[in-house]
């Protein structure tokens, strides 16, 4: 019996040592600071109360947001709404004899908002919505109806802007630069908030590229990382063009390791074999606060989920405007779980995941010193976010001095089932990280 117990004890000790992590073993945590999940609070359009009302709440709670802004209406922007193409009179005349079809639809839909008339812009939006819904024949009929009324003189002369464009008035580039300095991300929501799926190549590229140039000019290259095509379009043609101009689109991020759930999709993260889940949700005036909080709870109860929240209006200005009281309570709820959730801009979370997925980590332990190198092949200008590393250490270490370049920090060790470890931030593609016992 004693021999059996001794053998069992030996097996237990052997197995325990087997599963223990070897000192020096280093991995990249799934989320920054080894949080359970990530949350990005995003805003569309840039309506004025987002900055006058919501942003002070975010700053008080020390939460960072991403604002997708319509650039064409901001004073000082170089690029404004326009139609690039044939004279609109020629297009109008042609519609009298040639029905709208897949060959001429995009040109006609692009020109509709620039005929100098009040009303045709609404047809542009309706047709674009049908294209997004995969109903091109219905979209062609809408454009035929529009130009028939144009030829009959049923629209009044004037310049028409969409509601989102109008509601965004009131902010300057100087204001936005100040807000960006507070840690918020600003990103393109195009020049005029068009239905990109209804634009021809030339006019779509104008909206995509020129909005980016104004952001670049006024804020700098780091703010040209993210973008959102209006109405959350997932049109494949649009995404193909936009992805060549902006590294990260809230519309689509077709990564092989990411499960995407758009805000129009009622599904929940569920079971998946993907490394990450992007769980987009958009609260409207009809969304109960407990439902909004449940999205956060879902993220807390998983380890793979990135909750991307989409907001629009605030206190009566903007689409589906939520009250500041509701936003305050909701953001406070998120803040109260910040010990488990990484709350960061859309761009930073996208960068972290991509850096982690492509990075290589090497570590060497020698003479009581652990040397860790980390690198990735991504564009160094855009992908420069520190990653959180977890390095296992000899069991007798009580704390570690962690040095990378001119930065040095003493950190207490922690333990888990695999052994003694330390968590720390490290910049990829930089000089190695040195860990020594203290």
Image: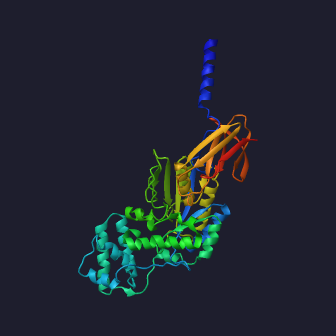
**Colour scheme of the rendered structure:** rainbow
Q: Quadrant of residue 390?
A: top right
259 to 49, vertically: above or below: above
Q: Nearer the viewer, residue 185 or 294?
A: 185
- Please provide percent x and percent y for residue 325: 61, 65
- Along the line of sight, the residue nearer the viewer: 180 or 201: 201
Asked if residue 283 is positioned above or below residue 14 in the image, the reply reads below
Q: Please tell me in which quadrant of the rendered image residue 202 appears.
A: bottom left
Q: Residue at the location (30% across, 84% down)?
A: 90
Residue 17 shown left or right of residue 111 in the figure: right
- Position of the C terminus, as image quadrant, is top right
- How many circles with numbers are drawn on the protein? 0
x and y, in percent, of residue 360 in the image: 55, 46
Which one is nearer the viewer's eye here, 70 or 154? 70
In which quadrant is the N terminus drawn? top right
Q: Find residue 97 and report its horizontal and vertical position in percent.
A: 23, 80
């Amino acid at each position: 019996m004693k021999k059996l117990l001794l053998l069992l004890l030996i097996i237990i000790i052997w197995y325990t040592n087997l599963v223990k992590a070897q000192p020096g073993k280093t991995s990249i945590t799934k989320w920054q600071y080894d949080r359970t999940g990530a949350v990005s609070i995003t805003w569309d359009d840039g309506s004025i109360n987002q900055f006058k009302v919501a942003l002070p709440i975010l700053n008080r709670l020390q939460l960072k947001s991403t604002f997708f802004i319509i650039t064409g209406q901001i004073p000082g922007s170089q690029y404004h709404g326009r139609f690039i193409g044939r004279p609109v009179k020629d297009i109008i005349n042609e519609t009298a004899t040639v029905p709208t079809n897949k060959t001429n639809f995009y040109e006609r839909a692009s020109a509709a908002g620039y005929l100098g008339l009040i009303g045709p812009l609404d047809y542009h939006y309706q047709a674009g919505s049908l294209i997004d819904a995969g109903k091109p024949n219905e979209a062609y009929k809408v454009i035929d109806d529009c130009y028939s009324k144009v030829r009959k003189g049923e629209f009044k002369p004037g310049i028409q802007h969409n509601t989102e464009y109008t509601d965004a008035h009131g902010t300057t580039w100087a204001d936005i630069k100040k807000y960006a300095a507070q840690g918020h991300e600003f990103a393109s929501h195009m020049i005029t908030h068009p239905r990109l799926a209804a634009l021809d190549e030339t006019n779509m590229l104008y909206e995509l590229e020129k909005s980016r140039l104004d952001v670049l000019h006024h804020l700098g290259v780091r703010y040209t990382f993210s973008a959102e095509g209006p109405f959350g379009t997932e049109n494949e043609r649009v995404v193909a063009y936009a992805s060549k101009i902006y590294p990260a689109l809230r519309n689509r991020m077709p990564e092989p390791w990411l499960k995407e759930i758009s805000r129009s999709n009622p599904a929940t993260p569920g079971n998946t074999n993907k490394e990450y889940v992007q769980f987009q949700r958009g609260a409207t005036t009809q969304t109960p606060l407990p439902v909004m909080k449940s999205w956060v709870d879902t993220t807390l109860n998983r380890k793979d989920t990135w909750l991307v929240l989409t907001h629009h209006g605030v206190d009566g200005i903007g689409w589906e405007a939520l009250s500041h009281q509701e936003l305050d309570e909701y953001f406070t709820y998120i803040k109260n779980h910040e010990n488990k959730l990484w709350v960061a801009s859309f761009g930073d979370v996208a960068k972290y995941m991509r850096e982690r997925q492509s990075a290589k980590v090497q570590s060497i332990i020698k003479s009581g010193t652990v040397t860790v190198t980390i690198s990735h092949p991504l564009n160094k200008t855009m992908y420069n976010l520190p990653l959180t590393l977890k390095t296992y250490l000899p069991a007798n270490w009580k704390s570690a001095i962690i040095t990378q370049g001119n930065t040095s920090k003493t950190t207490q060790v922690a333990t888990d089932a695999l052994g003694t470890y330390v968590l720390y931030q490290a910049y990829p593609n930089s000089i190695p990280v040195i860990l020594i016992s203290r």
